[in-house]
Image: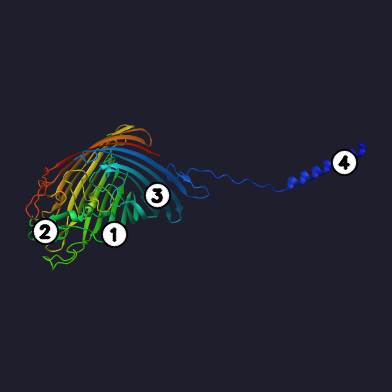
């Protein structure tokens, strides 16, 4: 019996050994390779390789909270406003045999309240695609900072200054690099972002008188005579995009840029219905073209302090006022040019001459600049300002039916000066305060009481002072990551 048990055990052991040997010879299924994020140092800090590709991606963002004060002029005006802005950026880059292929998306959401942020008595949320473009070699297509502007300027102001302050527009551009810091760009840009007319004020509520001989109300003569009368511009459909070009140099010491733009002006409402006093004039004014020229520069001044710099931007326009209107990007934003002041200054690219039916362009020029000084690596201050001068054709005046006032508020000057300071305790985090003073000078052309056709003075007519002062302030807390 013991012999049988030994034989059985020996057979079992042999079978187990054979089975183990055969199992060892079978192929073993390998675990899937682990994908991990690798740093991509080719394009700077923050980039990483997209797993499974040779492309690099950087994801970044910003959260900003602005608390503003704007001097009120009536009980209906908000003095306090708050803006909270969230931003997320995606920067994707791929090296190709034809050059760098870059895709960039910047998405922002604003939560705005108060008159300083354009929401008097309201709270609104504004999601938007702030930037979105593709670059391939020298080609740029999409929405990005206008090539008339100079995005390299080391500006730090929070409030508005009168120059082309890096507005984002829709465009198609080509940039050629000459080497040694020199480049040139030709850009076709959306003209709708650069319109400046009186439509936002309400066509039915505004009119224009030149030489004081009559009043135009919505294209109809309300008073005696038509000699010298001009009608505010109401834009027609977009036919030609703005043509923008620049030449730029960037070096270790700083940089300089010369820019130019051409802008089409088309009226849609002059003499529509054919005024009986002007039956021989065309229904619409002739199409005209305005232009703008800008020269900007910045310089590093390390002898004053590490990180210190200064910048300046000068602009001249004729029929393209939007190129000095603070870099805002929205059709018809020119109405209420200096927001919040009693004079309610408004400008337009052009006026229509009621005698000839021709467009008469508005000219303007501005100079803006600033200086930044680092007191320590963690604390800096800036002083900045701008001066703008606007010259309308003839003696154009704006008549406001709502208030019953007539004012020479097309020719005017505007002065802005401000200062701010920022605390920078850690990289990407800052806390700053700013004060900004604005002076609107209508050059002695003040509002006067206006009478209706029966000779009765409007009940709410008033006479404003020859100039207005506006104060505003802001506290900013911002984190970039």
- Identify the image quadrant of the C terminus: top left
* Real-space CA distance between mark 1 and mark 4, rounded to the nearest whole angstrom: 96 Å
Query: Which residue is under mark 2?
Result: 222
- Structural crowding at the residue carrying mark 3, measured as other residues with C-alpha within 10 Å and reported as few (<14), some (14–19) or many (≥20): some
Q: In terms of sequence position, does the residue under pointer 2 or pointer 3 come before the other?
A: 3
Residue 244 visible: no
Scheme by which the image is coloured: rainbow
Q: Secondary structure at mark 1?
A: loop
Is residue 481 or residue 368 the one in the foreground? 481
Q: Quadrant of residue 454?
A: bottom left
Residue 432 lies, with reference to residue 173, above or below; the image says above
Q: In terms of sequence position, does the residue under pointer 2 or pointer 1 come before the other?
A: 2
Query: Which residue is under mark 3?
Result: 105
Task: Tell me what residue is drawn at x 89 percent, y 40 percent.
Answer: 7
Q: Secondary structure at mark 4?
A: helix
- Structural crowding at the residue carrying mark 2, measured as other residues with C-alpha within 10 Å and reported as few (<14), some (14–19) or many (≥20): some
């Amino acid at each position: 019996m013991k012999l049988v048990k030994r034989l059985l055990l020996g057979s079992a052991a042999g079978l187990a050994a054979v089975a183990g040997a055969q199992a060892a010879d079978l192929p073993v299924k390998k675990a899937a390779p682990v994908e991990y994020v690798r740093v991509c140092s080719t394009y700077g800090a923050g980039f990483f390789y997209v797993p499974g590709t040779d492309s690099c991606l950087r994801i970044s963002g910003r959260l900003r909270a602005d608390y503003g004060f704007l001097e009120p002029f009536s009980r209906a005006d908000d003095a306090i406003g708050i803006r909270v802005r969230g931003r997320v950026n995606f920067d994707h880059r791929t090296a190709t045999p034809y050059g760098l292929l870059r895709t960039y998306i910047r998405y922002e959401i604003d939560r705005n309240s108060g008159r300083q942020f354009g929401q008097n008595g309201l709270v609104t949320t504004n999601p938007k695609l702030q930037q979105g473009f593709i670059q391939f070699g020298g080609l740029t297509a999409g929405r990005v900072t206008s090539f008339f502007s100079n995005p390299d300027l080391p500006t730090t102001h929070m409030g508005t200054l009168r120059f082309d302050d890096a507005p984002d527009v829709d465009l198609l551009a080509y940039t050629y690099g000459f080497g040694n810091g020199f480049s040139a760009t030709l850009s076709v840009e959306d003209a709708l972002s650069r319109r400046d007319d009186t439509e936002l004020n309400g066509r039915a509520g505004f009119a224009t008188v030149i030489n004081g001989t009559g009043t135009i109300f919505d294209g109809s003569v309300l008073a005696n005579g038509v000699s010298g009368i001009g009608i505010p511009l109401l834009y027609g459909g977009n036919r030609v995009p703005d043509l923008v070009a620049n030449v730029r140099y960037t070096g270790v010491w700083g940089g300089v840029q010369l820019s130019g733009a051409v802008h089409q002006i088309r009226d849609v409402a002059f003499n529509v219905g054919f005024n009986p006093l002007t039956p021989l004039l065309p229904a619409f004014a002739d199409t005209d073209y305005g232009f703008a020229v800008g020269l900007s520069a910045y310089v590093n001044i390390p002898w004053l302090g590490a990180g210190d710099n200064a910048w300046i931007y000068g602009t001249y326009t004729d029929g393209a006022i939007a190129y000095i209107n603070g870099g805002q990007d929205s059709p018809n934003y020119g109405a209420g040019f200096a927001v919040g002041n009693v004079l309610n200054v408004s400008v337009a690219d052009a006026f229509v001459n009621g005698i000839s039916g021709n467009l008469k362009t508005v000219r303007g020029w501005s100079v803006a600049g600033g200086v930044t000084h680092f007191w320590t690596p963690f604390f800096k201050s800036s002083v900045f300002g701008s001066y703008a001068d606007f010259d309308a054709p003839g003696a154009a005046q704006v008549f406001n039916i709502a208030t019953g006032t007539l004012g020479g508020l097309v020719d005017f000057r505007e002065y802005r000066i401000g200062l701010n300071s920022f605390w920078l305790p850690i990289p990407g985090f800052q806390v700053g305060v700013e004060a900004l003073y604005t002076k609107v000078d209508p050059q002695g052309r003040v509002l006067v009481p206006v009478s209706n056709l029966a000779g009765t003075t409007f009940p709410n007519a008033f006479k404003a002072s020859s100039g207005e002062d506006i104060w505003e302030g802001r506290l900013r807390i911002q984190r970039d990551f």
